[in-house]
Image: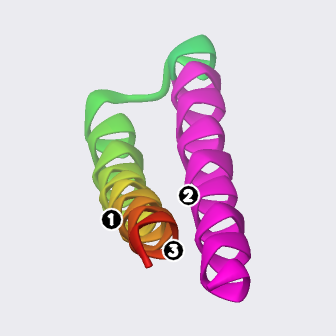
Amino acid sequence: MTALLILGVLIVAAGLFGLGYCIRAGFVIRREKPAPEVARARLQRLVAVNLGSVGLAALGLALVVAGLAL
């Protein structure tokens, strides 16, 4: 079950990295001050990445919990 725990930690780290990327990209978009329709399009793509990162982190957390329980 150690492998499950390590895999879960790596997946959580990847999810957190994705969340950090989303935060940084959001600040870059805000700093550039693009036209509203351009900003909306970029933020919509960023929301998809953000949702995927949260899902990945949740999956990794579930693996960590399963690894600890077993």
56 over 17 or under it: above or below: below
Residue type (three-letter) at the residue carrying disc 3: Gly
Q: Is residue 32 left or right of residue 59?
A: right
Q: Quadrant of residue 39?
A: top left
Q: Nearer the N terminus, badge 1 or badge 3?
A: 1
User: What's the CA distance linking mark 1 and mark 2?
Assistant: 8 Å
- x 45%, y 74%: residue: 63
- x 58%, y 71%: residue: 8
- Give the overall secondary structure of the magenta segment: helix
User: What's the CA distance linking mark 3 and mark 2?
Assistant: 18 Å
1 over 65 or under it: above or below: below
Q: Is residue 64 magenta?
A: no
Residue closer to the observer: 47 or 30: 47
Residue closer to the observer: 46 or 53: 53
Quadrant occupied by the C terminus: bottom left
Q: Residue furthest front?
A: 70
Tag shown at residue 5:
none
Q: Position of residue 9 (x, y in %)?
A: 66, 62
Q: Nearer the N terminus, badge 3 or badge 2?
A: 2
Residue closer to the observer: 8 or 57: 8
Circles 1 and 3 in contact, beta carbons < 8 Å: no
Kindly report which numbered mark, 3 or 2, lies closer to the viewer in this rendering: 3
Badge 2: residue crowd in 10 Å (few <14, some 14–19, many ≥20): many
Q: Is residue 24 magenta?
A: yes
Label 2 belongs to which residue?
A: 15
Magenta residues, start to end: 1-29
Tag shown at residue 67:
3
Q: Is residue 20 left or right of residue 49?
A: right
Label 1 belongs to which residue?
A: 55
Badge 1: residue crowd in 10 Å (few <14, some 14–19, many ≥20): some
